[in-house]
Image (cartoon, grey):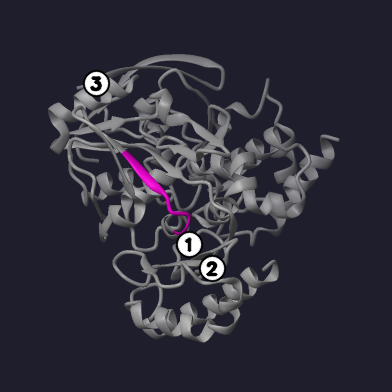
Amino acid sequence: MKEKLHFHVNGDEIFTEVEPNKTLLWLLREELGLTGTKEGCGAGECGACTVILNGNPVNSCLVMALEVNEGDIETIEGEAKNGELSPLQKAFIKHNGLQCGFCTPGMIMSAKALLNKNPNPDREEIKEAMQGNLCRCTGYESIIASIEAAIKEGE
Amino acid sequence: MQEFQYFRPETLNQAKDFLDKYGKDVKILAGGTDLIIALRDKTIVCKYVMDIKAIKELQIISYSDSEGLSIGSAVCLNEIIYSNDIKNHYPILVESAKTLANSLLRNRATIVGNICNASPGGDMISPSIVLDARIEIVSKQKTRTMPLKDFILGVKRTALKENELVTKINFPKIVGKGKYLRKSRIKGHDLAQVSVAAFLTEAGGLKLSIGAAGPTPIIVEGFENYKKVDLQSNKQEIIKKVMNEVKPIGDQRASKEYRIAMIKYLLTQIFEELEKEA
């Protein structure tokens, strides 16, 4: 039996109904069509499903949809504004922070959450914050470089 | 994902009533980082999931010099890591929380959830034991507290009854130095292969708890009344006693022999650390 759900995603107000056993990841992808957030492992190990919930980056595969009632969610779809990519997105492209791109939405949301709380992290702080996001392609150096470039860009 | 209903009580009384009525069919949801995976894999089956995160009393970290520290069961690990009270007075809890999973999961995972999940290698369990933690448990009928060391009964088994809820974990005021060391396969997000938590009181007594070396944390006793000079001269005796009591197994994370070797190594390291300021 579906339950009512009310929340905001990328500034849009959503009223919907969802079954109790659905995750936030399912809700975003299947119900709202926001397929930028990816399912990698479904077990909180890879970070491909990272979104920002009430200001904190979380694995959306481990949040039940009904838990976000009255909540505020930011996904990768909210990054670009008025057709212009965000500084993080531009930096990832310029500094080769992606190859296949599957981990990238999660990487950017984790990085964004970090910079929202700490606008000038050092390299160790970046690595600590990004620890939950795995990448099989890049070897991570270019991801760290992209984040450092975005920080510099913001200065 | 299996079917279940979701209930989010706004008060502790609502939670107690619900557990009283449906207890045996309820699983409690705090961070969900263990429960949701278990529900998906059907290693746990239930009719109701009760989300405790809206209950205000459970969201609180409180500290006083007289009462010590109290952490509510909805408090997540990152809140612990960033709490000045905990950093200043119980730094071993910050140290152990930082080893658990990664920052994303720590925005959801809770110390009480880690304890109630009762995994043999639970990173918050041994550090809490050496701090003499007590668990507060409520039901509709009563409130009770018990030492954490008596709460964990076996692999994924605790003393919590079907109609009960853990509301907080309490740590008495304790003076001394604590240290948590663990060995894992990789530096990043991984479960512990083996871990050691130690607390050296100001008077010189030593409390030790070893994780992932048996079905429950191995609490090695007999050193609580040591005076400072004893720790240095009795190191080998302490290590010998620990090695007699631990019961590690081999599994996908480490062989039995590796665990045994690493317990000895971590103990030596921990003694060096504790001696630095002794």
Q: Which amino acid type corresponds to the residue marked 2 in the rendered image? A: Ile
User: What residue would you read off at disc 2?
Assistant: B186
User: What residue would you read off at disc 1?
Assistant: B190
Q: Please tell me whether residue B125 belongs to the stretch shown in magenta.
A: no
Q: Please tell me whether residue B132 belongs to the stretch shown in magenta.
A: yes
Picture coordinates of residue B98, whole percent (x, y): 56, 53
How many C-alpha atoms fall within 10 Å of the one at disc 3: few (<14), some, or many (≥20)? Answer: few
Image mark 3: chain = A
Distance in Å between CA atoms under marks 3 and 2: 42 Å
Asked if disc 3 and disc 2 are in contact, CB closer than 8 Å, the reply is no
Label at residue A2: 3
Q: Secondary structure at mark 2?
A: loop
Picture coordinates of residue B3, whole percent (x, y): 19, 35
Q: Secondary structure at mark 3?
A: loop
- Residue located at (53% from left, 52% from top): B97
Residue that sits furthest to the right in the current view: A155
Quarter of the image where the N terminus of chain A is located: top left
Q: Which residues are magenta?
A: B130-136
